[in-house]
Image: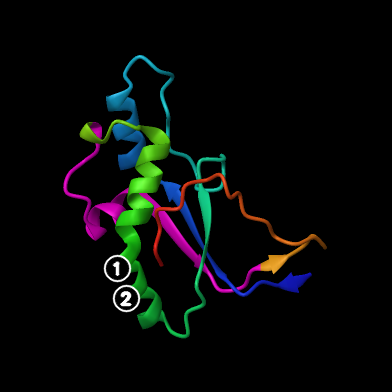
Amino acid sequence: MIPVDRQALYLAPKKPLTDWVNYVFPDEEKVSPEEPLANDWGTVYLVPIFNSEEEYEAWMQENFQAFFETELYDWCEDETQWPSPLTMELFQEWFHVSFQSVVLDTIDLPITKDDDEEDDWDF
């Protein structure tokens, strides 16, 4: 296993987010919150390496909205249905947030990026 020069941020929905999904899509199969790892609703983001908790917290305060918008878009593309405003407090209410400082690559192949994907992020 080879260490990767990134850290990881894991986001998984909490009950307020799934309540919102069920409200926005009342005719769809109901989504119910479970343990954060009990389904594939979570997302792992590779993020910069932080040297302290304070550095990470400042970076998250600057960037939480991009994560929030990405996650909401995955559930509902209609931004008029999104809550407003998207605050850090709401983000913390709606998502389990887990920061992981060790990321290991278990595959002996280069990591590739999909050049076809739109990159709106400017970290």
- Quarter of the view holding residue 78: top left
Q: How many discs mark residues in the rendered view?
A: 2
* Rendered image: mark on residue 58: 2
User: Regarding mark 2 in the picture, which secondary structure is present there?
Assistant: helix
- What is the basis of the colouring in this image? rainbow
Residues packed near mark 1 inside 10 Å, few (<14), some (14 to 19) or many (20 plus): few
**Of 70 and 42, which appears nearest the observer?**
70
> Which residue is painted at 56% across and 47% down in the image?
37
Q: Is residue 63 above or below residue 82?
A: below
| Amino acid type, callout 2 | Ala
Q: Is residue 33 above or below residue 50?
A: above
**Label 1 belongs to which residue?**
62
Is residue 101 found inside the magenta-colored segment of the image?
yes
> Which residue is painted at 46% across and 48% down in the image?
12
What percent of the width, then of the height, locates residue 101? 56, 74
Position of 31 with respect to 108 (left or right) is: left
What percent of the width, then of the height, locates residue 90? 24, 52
Position of 10 with respect to 77 (left or right) is: right
* Rendered image: mark on residue 79: none
Chain part drawn in magenta: 81-103
